[in-house]
Amino acid sequence: MELEKYKKWMEAAQQFQSESFWNKIFDSPNLKNPPLTPIKMSELIPKCDLYESEEYLIAEIELPGVPKESLHISVQRQLLVITGEFKTLKVNHKYHLKERPNHQFKKELTLPYPIDVKDVKSELRNGVLFIVMPFTMDDMETIPIELNDSAAE
């Protein structure tokens, strides 16, 4: 009797080892929740917040240990781009633990409003980059929508 239970358990366990089983699980169009999409490291590092006050959009970007000389900030239309490099590797050092990788980054934030680029201010304070951007609604255009009744028929 115990041998029969063991055989059933082995059959069940083997299906979990097959690649086709996992492909059915994650590639099935009938899933209530879609499969997880991989997250790029650039989406996580550096972490940032974007919020607004009455007149400004403010971005706070975590950049511990990054010198201002390795940072570049640009605004292109409504896209804020921050690039730089985390340089953590010390040459001629014997590491016992190395968890902080050397890597370049590029963080792109889509801004909700057009920015007055000439008045943007930035400051690197305690490992956090603050970018204060005055926004303007003058450049935003409203496009009228015409109603064509003949198209509804």
Image (cartoon, rainbow, N blue to C red):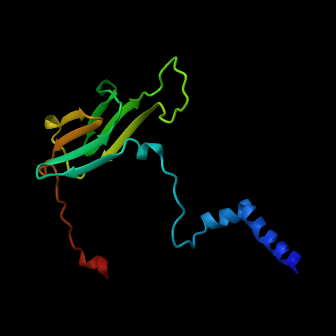
Q: Is residue 15 above or below residue 62?
A: below
Residue 91 visible: yes
Picture mark count = 0
Residue 129, position as x, y percentages in the image:
27, 37
Residue 68, position as x, y percentages in the image:
29, 27
Residue nearer the viewer, 153 or 26:
26
Residue 77, position as x, y percentages in the image:
25, 43
| Quarter-of-image position of residue 8 | bottom right
Answer left or right for 48 relative to 102. Answer: left
Answer left or right for 111 relative to 93. Answer: left
Q: Residue at x 32, y 39 (%)?
A: 81
Answer left or right for 106 relative to 102. Answer: left
Q: Is residue 108 above or below residue 8?
A: above
Q: Is residue 85 above or below residue 28?
A: above
Q: Residue at x 78, y 65 (%)?
A: 14
Residue 12, position as x, y percentages in the image:
76, 71
Q: Residue at x 39, y 37 (%)?
A: 106
Residue nearer the viewer, 36 or 6:
6
Q: Residue at x 86, y 77 (%)?
A: 2
In the current view of this chain or complex, which residue is farthest to the front? 96
Residue nearer the viewer, 19 or 61:
61
Answer left or right for 78 relative to 24. Answer: left
Q: Is residue 96 above or below residue 60?
A: above
Quadrant placement of the C terminus: bottom left
| Quarter-of-image position of residue 144 | bottom left
Residue 111 visible: no
